[in-house]
Image (spheres, helix red, strand yellow):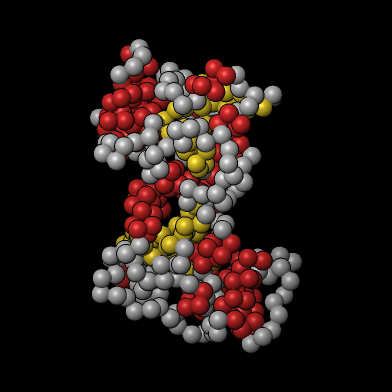
Amino acid sequence: MATTPVQQQQRLAAARHRFAEGGELPAQLLAPALLRSWERSRQAGIRPQQAPQYAALAQRRLRLDAPLDRLLARCVRQDMDDLWAAFGGRRWTLFCVNRDGLIIAQREHGLADEPVLRPIQIGRRVREIEIGTTAPACTLAEAALMQVRGNEHYLDEFAAVYCLSVPLQGVDGEVLGALDITGIGERDSELLGGYFRQAALSVQNQLLHTLRDCHLLALQHDARWLGTPLQGLLAVHEDGQLRAANSVARRLLGLPRSGVLPPLSLSALFCHASVHQRRRLLQPGPVHRVPLRADNALQVQYLRAPVSAHGSTRGVAVAAVEAGSLRAQGAQAARAAVAAQGGNLSAAARQLGISRTTLYRKLQQGG
């Protein structure tokens, strides 16, 4: 006979206390990743009945000392605003942690009403050695989307809490941190996970845009996904050597999923393309089809040349307007603005002074 969600939560609560005393868990009661987190929490000496042990906040807790923390907080800001507008509310908080579990950015409302959530603030850490199993801690350990419901947490105090977290990857595919939503209640996990995965892709794309000394190319099988978080991105040195690729591009091109890329040139990546097609890869122009293998091709869009130390994002858009027909000019300016804004369509539309609908229409032109 199948157990109800309430019965499952009751079983978890009872099993957790037996586990904390050294007992074993019933088979398949807990997902393997969560079981590993419970084991780490137990090894750290955490007891389910204890209160969360948050470190005291520094007086200047809003100041981020590490340059990488400041960069990640800046790149995640817009996506956090968008996610909060869609899924935030009273009794919920949305936050970003770095690789060490330090909260570096946050959106919240009404947390004073929830004592269990009130201590979650910028400048605090959410690590297993202090508060046991949580979604961001599991995400940092597993480099994967994680959700933790109710008594899947290791502390009794989190029995009413739901949290979902996704990893945030850097330009070399390394995990820089995690983006998490935590609150009292439930969310549609499948829907929420889809939005958070796209936000994580958007953040990684913005990080690639900070590689100012590189050409940037966008690619996808379907040109409709260009200019969105689902586009592949390549950062390429002036000599044609690949510097970095986002996670989508790595999948499209069959590259290692993480780590610094091996020495590789555009010519080697697109060895089935003609000399003319390879030459066009680093030249401004409309979206064009480039063979990847004998039976496969990608739609490739040149986004941006290397940007000088004094270059401006507006200059990127202006340069695109100077070539081609009026139709192509509008499409190139739209693509350049989207590139300059790290793939954020709303910000690009504001830069150009047009609506999102008009921007989207321009992105479809000239392809």
Estimate the x, y position of residue 170 in percent, counting from the top left.
47, 51
Q: Is residue 95 above or below residue 192?
A: below
In the rendered image, which quarter contains the N terminus? bottom right
Q: Nearer the viewer, residue 118 or 341?
A: 341
Looking at the rendering, which quadrant does residue 104 occupy? bottom left
| Residue at (61, 36) in percent of width and height | 253
> Does residue 112 lie above or below 251 as drawn?
below
Query: In the image shown, does 360 or 171 lie closer to the viewer?
Result: 171
Residue occupying the point 37% across, 40% down: 212
Q: How many numbered circles does the render carry?
A: 0
Would residue 245 appear left or right of 66 to someone viewing this image? right
Residue found farthest to the front = 239
Residue nearer the viewer, 261 or 143: 261
Q: Which residue extends farthest top?
A: 325
Q: Residue 273 appears at what percent x and percent y? A: 61, 22
Rendered position, 51 above or below 175: below
Is residue 358 at all visible to an observer of this figure? no
In-image side of 105 versus 364 (left or right) = left
Q: Position of residue 300 (x, y in %)?
A: 51, 27
Where in the figure is residue 233, as x and y percent of width and height?
A: 49, 37
* Residue at image coords 43%, 18%: 366
Residue farthest to the bottom, as pictured: 21
Q: Quick check: can you spot residue 211?
A: yes
Could you tell me which residue is drawn at 45 percent across and 33 percent down? 238
What is the quadrant of residue 363 in the picture? top left
* 241 relative to 33 in the view: left or right: left
